[in-house]
Amino acid sequence: MADGRDVTLRLNEQPRLEFLFSFLVARVARGDDPGVDRSALADEVAPGFPAGSQRDRLRKQLYALQAALGSELKALVRVTNTQVRLELGGIDTDFGRLLEASRLVARRRGLIDDVFADQIRSLLDDTLSGEFLSSFSELEHQVTEGRGSAAQVVEEARSSIAGQRADLARALAEYHEASGRPQASIAYLRAALAGCPARQDLARLLVVAYMRTGQTTLADQARLEFDLTEEK
């Protein structure tokens, strides 16, 4: 989603364009430099073809992608002789809001305040359902038969997003614990642990929340589930 609209709707009937756009989005969501070398991108969208054919195919797909996005959005795709990047500055995206909020949490030295807690709750609620680029595996198989590195980029983006959600859930749980409302943290911690099951810091907070609310059986189950059996 971008600014409340699904900008990929126009691409749904054009798998190659949807694949190209999704790959560029994933690079942004991964949190690194979204720019990609044109030759590398050409190999990604047309693996196995001669280099000249790859470059020609990419050039045509980039032109078609900008046309499909329309006059109001085509400027998001910045193309130079050497690089292609998706510029989402100023565009409201779910993953962009998660990244910004997680950065704000990381810069704080203490507990979040009431206003920020409300913002985090709303953000986690809004982004709770659905996996990032959930149908990408099928799309990649259709377009490239899985011969590139796009799947890895998407998985890394999903991991980054899950980590950001986990960091926000931790900040919210610590706030709820200090406010005497541990029950309010449980659903957020469980959701975050579904994406980051190795985050034992979240698991400990979940156990504490269960114990504080008298749910000792669930606390014991959580200790077993997340390998906290030595922490009584």
Image (tube, rainbow, N blue to C red):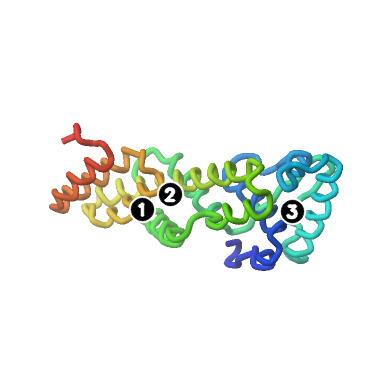
* C-alpha distance separating marks 1 and 3: 33 Å
Residue 211 visible: yes
Tag 1: amino acid: Ala
Give the labeled residue for mark 2.
Answer: 165
Tag 3: amino acid: Val
Give the labeled residue for mark 3.
Answer: 77
* C-alpha distance separating marks 2 and 3: 27 Å
Looking at marks 1 and 3 on the same chain, the residue that comes earlier in the sequence is marked by 3
Give the structural element (helix, strand or loop) at label 3.
Answer: strand
Q: Which quarter of the picture shows residue 5? A: bottom right
Q: Residue 16 has which mark?
A: none
Where is the C terminus found, in terms of image quarters?
Answer: top left
Q: Is residue 135 left or right of residue 125?
A: right
144 to 110, vertically: above or below:
below
Q: Are marks 2 and 1 in contact (CB under 8 Å)?
A: yes
Which residue is located at x 19 percent, y 46 percent? 219
Looking at marks 2 and 1 on the same chain, the residue that comes earlier in the sequence is marked by 2
Tag 2: amino acid: Arg
Q: Nearer the viewer, residue 7 or 11?
A: 11
Give the structural element (helix, strand or loop) at label 1.
Answer: helix
Looking at marks 2 and 3 on the same chain, the residue that comes earlier in the sequence is marked by 3
Give the structural element (helix, strand or loop) at label 2.
Answer: helix
Q: Residue 191 has which mark?
A: 1
Which residue is located at x 49 percent, y 48 percent? 161
What x and y, as percent, mark residue 227?
A: 26, 36
Which residue is located at x 81 percent, y 40 percent? 82
Q: Is residue 139 left or right of residue 187?
A: right
